[in-house]
Image (tube, rainbow, N blue to C red):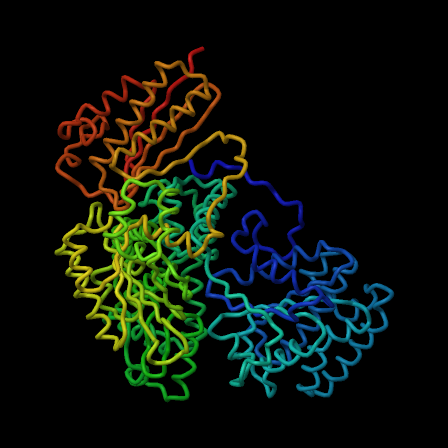
Amino acid sequence: MSNEIPLQRSPHRRILGRVAPDLFLGRSDALAGIASLAPHASGPRGLLVLAAPAAGASELLRQAYDKFFQQHGAASPIYFQWSRNDRTVALAARRFLHTFLAQLVAHRRDDPSFVNAPPPLRDLIDLADPSDYEWIERVVEAFERARDRADERALVHLCLSAPQLAAARGARSLILFDDVHSVDKLKGEVNLGIEIAQVAVHAEVPFVLSGLRRGLLDTLNGGDSPTRFDSFTTINLETLADPDARTLVDRLAYARRVTLNEQTRDLIAQQFDGSPFYVSAFMQAAKRTGVELTSFLNCQKLYVDELMGGRANRRFNAILEEIAPVLTTRRALVRVLHDSAVNAGGKSPAEAWRRRLELEPEQLYPVMNALHTHELASFNATFMEISANPVWRDYLKASYRLQVAAEPRALVVAETLLETLKRAPQTMARHYRRASALGLRELLERFDAQRVPASLLHNDRFSRAYRGADTEEAGAGLDAETDLIRLPQVVHAASCESFHLAMRQVCDEERCAVAHGFDAMPYADANEIVWIAAEIEGKMEIGRALTEVWCDRLPQVANACGFRRVRLWLVSPEGFTAEAAELLNERDVFSSSRRQLELLTARLSPEGLIGEGASPEPPDEFEMVIPMGGDTELIAAHTVEQIARRLKFMPEAINQIKTALVEACINASEHSLSPDRKIYQRFRVESDRLVVTVSSRGVRIPTAAQQGQNSNGHDPVGESAGRRGWGLKLIRTLMDEVEFERVDDGTRLRMTKFLPR
């Protein structure tokens, strides 16, 4: 199982953190950025956290608070979450002062009970440290006078200046302001966002200002230039990267005692796009309902339940209720959102929104701006474009059918489940294809006027010179080349789809990139150039016909986008045939194979190469991924031989293990429909056995043989399909235990060989 690794629990106390530190992943850099704000230290005076929705910004600040609370004698962490529930600017400012004093006293007394249950203001005076008694009493008295005078501006200034007043008396603090964008919803004469910005920039106390990335700066600037934050650093908080998201799913499954497997783990990470909020909510729902997440069906059933009434449903409901408090307006908004989503490209004119919602411009703009801030849609003054986030789209479609079309709930649930189940394999296939892409955009971003050997951009030259040469020989040859090409200085790179939407129909987003830059100095129109690079998928060298299609297609993109000077670059994993190379030279198009790309990448980022240091202690479990075909099963056989020798297997047994593994790899290569064409292998070493698992990942397309699977559960592809029908039978004679298992997106073969006693 993928969740059988115990966690090492942190000894730190959880005060405000909602999850254990062990489950807070992928944010070490952000935590380090907050830690760098130690008072009176050189460096940045503050930090802006521009967060994507549901990316876990609140948990980041809460985890930082818990971490700093343990540091006695250091600055006192103060966490405050601004909320529209305060209704007025004055009430929000009063709550901040109360929170500040309570958390300051709690830290200096090392008593976290005051954090979640702050005593009344007057009681805090008596609870304070003797060195703080006098200044806290003066602050409280000044607050009471300002409150009684009903002077909102004076009250706000006094409350927000409390950290600076405390610092002047030797009580240092680190202010963590959360959800700052929400102060726009508070009523009052004072622009609270601007006041917060002024205090944060001019105080000697470090501030962390966090909020939604599309609303935070607008709130703080009040329409002015953001140069006032020159002394601040910025963190763009995205959702978790795929490895961190998968680890989070695994750890949550272990902590919540939820059973899952690798396929469902990957589906959960992909379906929620690495959002810590959605992943945590989903795993909590699995724990609450006792669902075993061992199949796509179970995952999608739970997903639809959450969509209809769980935390995902409540989150979107709360946002829409905030945007459109009146029920009739909210229902009309759901209709317009849904109709826009089903339009081509998800776009619709803003004027059409005004007519359909029957709102005046001054009423419509706040609605559109709020949708934009929460990234449910993008508002560009003339058009609204609905977000492509699948969770939001699923919620929107279900809400429309239930609330507007008034369809039976059972029908909506059933058809939503059917749709999400059909989409699950497509989601995983998309993930596999994205993971196997060669990374053209990332490589183009590294172009900075370097000079590289010309053969790295001419596949025919490279093939003639280095076919059969190992990496060291090829590297030496490239070093000796005198024909060099100067790369452009790239200033911007993005997917081709971002410029020309029609490319979505013929190419994955990750496999075609456009880079703008200059191929000479100075920065002038004459030196401006655009590189368009495309990866052509193929298991063999690409021929002339397909090459010609791409040589015609990319100039069409350039013409449609109005690019003047263009350089085309085609990349194929296995390179191009001689006929295709002739065409590429005629059209003056650069060409490379996967190997050329790897050598080019190494030359542009030599620090990324892995050195040969001391190897760690041999682990109890090894994992290896090999491409299908090309006799790569011999690599697997060599690997398992070394492991078996370490376990002291006899030579005869080693040969049996090697033969079984080779047969399993050949069967996977010949019969798998995996989109990434890879074989995943795991070698697990136990005290009395060696367990070898061979799996192929991807979408399984039913075939006639698969539809005729026999009743005893044996795989027809392994036992009755063509000339290799005896494959699984042979493996069973060679190994002690053999288990064949169908999984959601492929097959898995587990083979065990016992050590003789």
Q: Which residue lies at the image location 58% right of the left edge and 84% below the top edge? A: 191
Q: How many numbered discs? A: 0
Residue 272: where, in percent of width, then height?
A: 39, 56
Answer left or right for 227 relative to 53.
Answer: right
Residue 287: where, in percent of width, then height?
A: 46, 45
Is 624 in front, or is 421?
A: 624
Is 150 in front, or is 195?
A: 195
For the N terminus, the image quarter is: top left
**Image: 555 above or below 660:** below
Q: Confirm whether residue 357 shows in the render.
A: yes
Is 456 in front, or is 670?
A: 456
Q: Confirm whether residue 288 shows in the render.
A: no
Is 240 in front, or is 155?
A: 240
Residue 576: where, in percent of width, then height?
A: 20, 51
Answer left or right for 533 relative to 133.
Answer: left
* Residue 128 sits in quarter: bottom right
Q: Which residue lies at the image location 57% right of the left edge and 47% below the top edge? A: 22
Residue 757: where, in percent of width, then height?
A: 45, 10
Residue reaching furthest top? Answer: 757
* Residue 8 sits in quarter: top right
**Image: 373 above or below 662:** below
Q: Which residue lies at the image location 25% right of the left edge and 43% below the top edge? A: 674
